[in-house]
């Protein structure tokens, strides 16, 4: 009896330690990035802007107005980054003739917010960005990387751009989390255990965070960019997204992991993105309402 009691206590201790460990990992995954003060880049005519709304995190951003442009592009960064991460893209697009709008998502950079929500809650941020009001009568493009791409997907269908560039977008939170698990055996189970705390901590579950179920509702020209060796987003997720978004283009970056695709292969990036945006934002007859 004493031995059985000892075994039961040992198992209980292991369970407690495991639960505490899972909770701590969850805390790290959703914790906001440290607040930062970002210096305005000197080589673009950026104006600093703030968006305030009762009951929502304040959002900090930059806008560069290109006079005579045929469109404005909203650029959103990835997880753990801020708007500085998309400045090089902004320069590329500004020089190509577009106005650009860059914002820190909530929980990042200079914006408010206390947690990161895997793109699901950040969809509310993307929906608030005022590009159409700032640039009335112009076409609007949306470019997001990873978390930023998911945010743009979850902003729809309430808020729609005229063309979308989605980089390194995951299909479902459960799949991309499983690919991040430390042990290759039973990765799906590991992900389920980690994600089980979401309803308590965030008010929604992993079943809600499925860009693959939302991307088809966009109904606008869309291009997907992905690395062939991304350790978090496998080919199956990318092709599922393409299948879900009828008519979506897909450009692979051979040998790229979950990295900055513009830096990885600038030529391929430019040859994919610039013609796509020009066709859908600048050419006559490209309006989508």
Image (tube, rainbow, N blue to C red):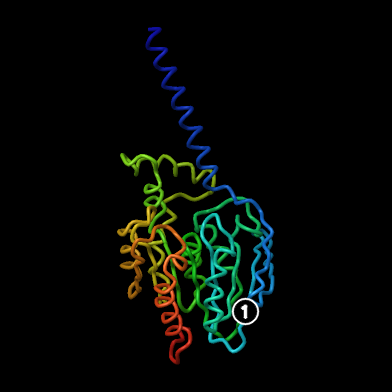
In the displayed orientation, state which residue is furthest to the bottom: 284
Image quadrant where residue 48 sits: bottom right
Point out residue 289 in the picture as x, y percentages from the top left corner: 48, 84
From the viewer's perspective, tell me whether residue 248 is left or right of residue 103: left
Could you say where residue 22 lies in the image, as x and y percent from the top left?
Answer: 48, 37
Badge 1 marks a residue whose secondary structure is helix
Residue located 37% across and 51% down the image = 175
Q: Is residue 173 above or below residue 190?
A: below
Residue labelled with disc 1 = 133
What residue appears at the point 55 percent right and 85 percent down from the top-left corner?
138
Query: Residue 43 sits in which quadrant?
Result: bottom right
Q: In the depicted view, which residue is nearer to us: 92 or 204?
A: 92
107 horizontally vs 78: left or right: right
In the rendered view of the protein, which quadrant contains the N terminus?
top left
Question: Would you place residue 278 above or below residue 241 in this image?
Answer: below
Q: How many marks?
A: 1
Left or right: 223 in relation to 71? left
- Label 1: how many Cα within 10 Å (few below 14, some 14–19, many 20+): few
How far across and down, in percent of the image, does residue 237 sit? Answer: 34, 59
Give percent across and percent down for residue 196: 44, 42
Q: Determine whether 15 is above or below 177 in the image.
A: above
Which one is in front, 233 or 135? 233
**Frontmost residue, 260 versus 192:** 260
Identity of the residue drawn at 38% across and 64% down: 226
In percent of the image, x 59 and y 69: which residue is there?
102
């Amino acid at each position: 009896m004493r031995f059985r009691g000892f075994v039961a206590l040992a198992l209980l201790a292991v369970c407690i330690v495991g639960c505490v460990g899972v909770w701590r990992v969850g805390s790290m995954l959703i914790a906001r990035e440290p607040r930062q003060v970002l210096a305005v880049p000197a080589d673009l005519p950026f104006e600093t802007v703030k968006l305030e709304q009762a009951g929502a995190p304040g959002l900090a951003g930059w806008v560069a107005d290109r006079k005579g442009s045929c469109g404005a592009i909203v650029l959103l960064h990835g997880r753990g980054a801020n708007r500085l991460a998309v400045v090089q893209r902004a320069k590329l697009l500004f020089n190509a003739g577009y106005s650009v709008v860059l914002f820190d998502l909530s929980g990042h950079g200079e914006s408010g917010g206390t947690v990161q929500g895997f793109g699901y809650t950040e969809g509310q941020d993307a929906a608030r960005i005022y590009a159409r009001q700032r640039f009335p009568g112009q076409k609007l493009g949306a470019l997001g990387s990873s978390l930023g791409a998911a945010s743009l997907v979850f902003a729809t269908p309430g808020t729609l751009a005229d063309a979308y560039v989605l980089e390194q977008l995951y299909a479902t939170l459960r799949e991309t989390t499983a690919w991040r698990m430390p042990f290759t055996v039973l990765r799906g189970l590991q992900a389920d255990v980690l994600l089980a705390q979401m309803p308590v901590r965030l008010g929604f579950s992993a079943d809600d965070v499925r860009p693959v179920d939302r991307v088809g509702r966009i109904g606008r020209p869309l291009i997907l960019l992905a690395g062939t060796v991304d350790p978090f987003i496998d080919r199956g997720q990318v092709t599922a997204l393409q299948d879900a978004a009828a008519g979506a283009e897909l450009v692979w970056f051979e040998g790229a992991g979950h990295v900055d695709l513009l830096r990885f292969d600038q030529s391929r990036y430019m040859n994919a993105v610039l013609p796509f945006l020009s066709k859908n934002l600048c050419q006559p007859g490209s309006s989508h309402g």
